[in-house]
Image (tube, rainbow, N blue to C red):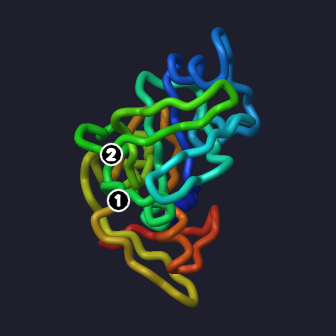
């Protein structure tokens, strides 16, 4: 029983209000391509993230628009920007750093929401049953290869709307030479 891996590049989730502030009143995000999780998509639109030390250009927006704005970057991206992103689960943004977004209609300072996403596995309830795990459980995941690695404390996230996939960021993937759709195994 293997788990496909999705390597997550830097991206931003925007609220409707922030979309309108950066792109104009009534603006709707344009779907570029579907993502592995049902209903999620990469947008054609990008923004620039402005940090104290540097910028990240062409940061992809992921849709659809959300209730809150959240920027997910790697720890290496944090060095470029001059910030230290805390490793957090998506949505856990209290006490996180602010950041500045630049869109075609100007700049906006977002007061919180900059994180390095903690590695996790999306599972449908039938997957969780098959693997014998529960929502919120942390597991060890083995990825074979020339630079094989075991990821400890990988969080299981279970929802009816999820499709089976482990998410890691570019830093984690590059360290172990992991590609999208590579397979991983739950260690017992």
Mark 2 to mark 1 CA distance (whole Å):
8 Å
Give 151 or 169, whichever is nearer the viewer. 169
Estimate the x, y position of residue 46 in percent, counting from the top left.
67, 39
Q: Which mark is residue 84?
A: 1
Q: Residue at x 25, y 37 (%)?
A: 94
Mark seen at residue 70: none
Name the residue located 60 percent from the left edge and 25 percent from the top edge. 22
Q: Which of 131/142 is in front?
A: 142
Q: Secondary structure at mark 1?
A: loop
Task: Tell me where residue 102 sits by quadrant.
Answer: top right
Residue lying furthest bottom: 146
Instruction: Locate residue 24, reporting x and y percent.
Output: 66, 16
Give the answer, above or below, for where 60 lies relative to 180.
Answer: above
Q: Quadrant of the C terminus?
A: bottom left
Going 44% across and 53% down the picture, which residue do you hit? Answer: 52
Q: Residue at (50%, 30%) from the top-left corner?
A: 108
Characterize the local packing of mark 2: few (<14), some (14-19) or many (20 or more) Cα atoms within 10 angstroms: some
State the image coordinates of residue 140 (x, y, percent, origin top left).
32, 69
Say if 58 sits above or below 183 in the image.
Answer: above
Along the horizontal axis of the image, is 72 left or right of 34? left
Identify the residue position indicated by label 2 in the image: 97
Q: Which residue occupies the foreground of this view, 41 or 22?
A: 22
Dot 1 alpha-carbon crowd within 10 angstroms: few under 14, some 14 to 19, many 20 or more: some
Q: Earlier in the sequence, mark 2 or mark 1?
A: 1
In the rendered image, the vertical position of residue 64 relative to residue 81, given as above or below: above
Residues at badges 2 and 1 in contact (C-beta under 8 Å)? yes
Q: Position of residue 79 (x, y in %)?
A: 45, 66
The picture quadrant where one finds residue 23 is top right
């Amino acid at each position: 029983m293997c788990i496909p891996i999705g390597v997550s590049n830097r991206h931003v989730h925007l609220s409707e209000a922030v979309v309108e502030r950066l792109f104009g009143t009534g603006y709707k995000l344009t779907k570029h391509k579907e993502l592995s999780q049902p209903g999620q998509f990469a947008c054609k639109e990008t923004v620039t993230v402005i940090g104290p030390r540097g910028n990240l250009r062409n940061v992809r927006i992921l849709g659809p628009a959300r209730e809150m704005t959240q920027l997910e970057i790697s720890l290496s991206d944090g060095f470029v920007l001059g910030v230290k992103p805390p490793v957090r689960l998506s949505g856990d943004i209290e006490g996180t750093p602010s950041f500045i977004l630049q869109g075609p209609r100007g700049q906006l300072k977002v007061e919180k929401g900059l994180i390095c996403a903690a590695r996790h596995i999306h599972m449908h309830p039938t997957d969780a049953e098959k693997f014998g795990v529960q929502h919120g459980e942390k597991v060890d995941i083995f990825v074979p290869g020339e630079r094989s690695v075991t990821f400890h404390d990988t969080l299981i996230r279970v929802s009816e709307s999820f499709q089976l996939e482990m998410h890691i960021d570019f830093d984690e993937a590059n360290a172990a030479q992991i590609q999208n759709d590579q397979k991983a195994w739950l260690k017992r």
